[in-house]
Amino acid sequence: MNLNLYYHGVLYGNLPLKKKDSTYLRKLKIPSAMDTPEWKEQEDYKKLCFARFCWTRRDQLTPKGLMTWAKRFEEMHNEPLRVYARRKIDEQNLQKKPGSKTREKV
């Protein structure tokens, strides 16, 4: 199987990602896709997008009706939605100019 097709299949969910220490990957000498900076950056962006989605619906129930969206975020990412939002807002405030007096609240 062509290496690019393998990664394409993994990224788009058509193929399962082989375990990091699998003999299959050692034979092909393929680095784990999850070790690349692009993968981490993409995962961080997906987490941010999901947090934005959950924030507007944080007190509503998920479609199955078993939990709220805030609880679902915490279950998926092992971090409460409010804590994640506070951390992201603080990161943004650090990037702003020091003279800026506006601060967003959560």
Image (tube, rainbow, N blue to C red):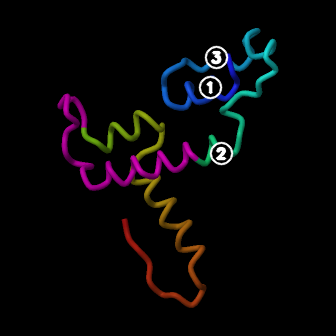
Q: Earlier in the sequence, mark 2 or mark 3?
A: 3
Quick check: marks 1 and 3 in contact, CB under 8 Å?
no
Q: What percent of the width, then of the height, locates residue 98?
A: 60, 85
Which stretch appears magenta? 42-67
Label ID, residue 5? 1
Kind of element beneath mark 1 = helix
Give amino acid for label 2. Answer: Glu
* Residue name at image x 24 percent, y 34 percent: 67
Pick whichever, 102 or 36, lies toward us: 36
Give amino acid for label 3. Answer: Lys
Q: What percent of the width, then of the height, locates residue 19?
A: 66, 16
Q: Magenta stretch containing residue 49, yes or no?
A: yes
Above or below residue 85? Residue 2 is: above
Q: Earlier in the sequence, mark 1 or mark 2?
A: 1
Q: Check disc 1: other Cα within 10 Å, few if <14, some if 14-19, many if 20+.
A: few
Give amino acid for label 1. Answer: Leu
* Residue name at image x 37 percent, y 54 percent: 52
Provide the residue designation for mark 3: 18
Q: Earlier in the sequence, mark 1 or mark 3?
A: 1
Above or below residue 88? Residue 11 is: above
Kind of element beneath mark 3 = loop
Horizontal placement of 97 versus 52: left or right? Answer: right
Instruction: Name the mark nearer the viewer: 1 or 3.
Output: 1
Provide the residue designation for mark 2: 38
Q: What's the distance in space between the residues labelled 1 and 3, CA to CA?
A: 14 Å
Kind of element beneath mark 2 = helix
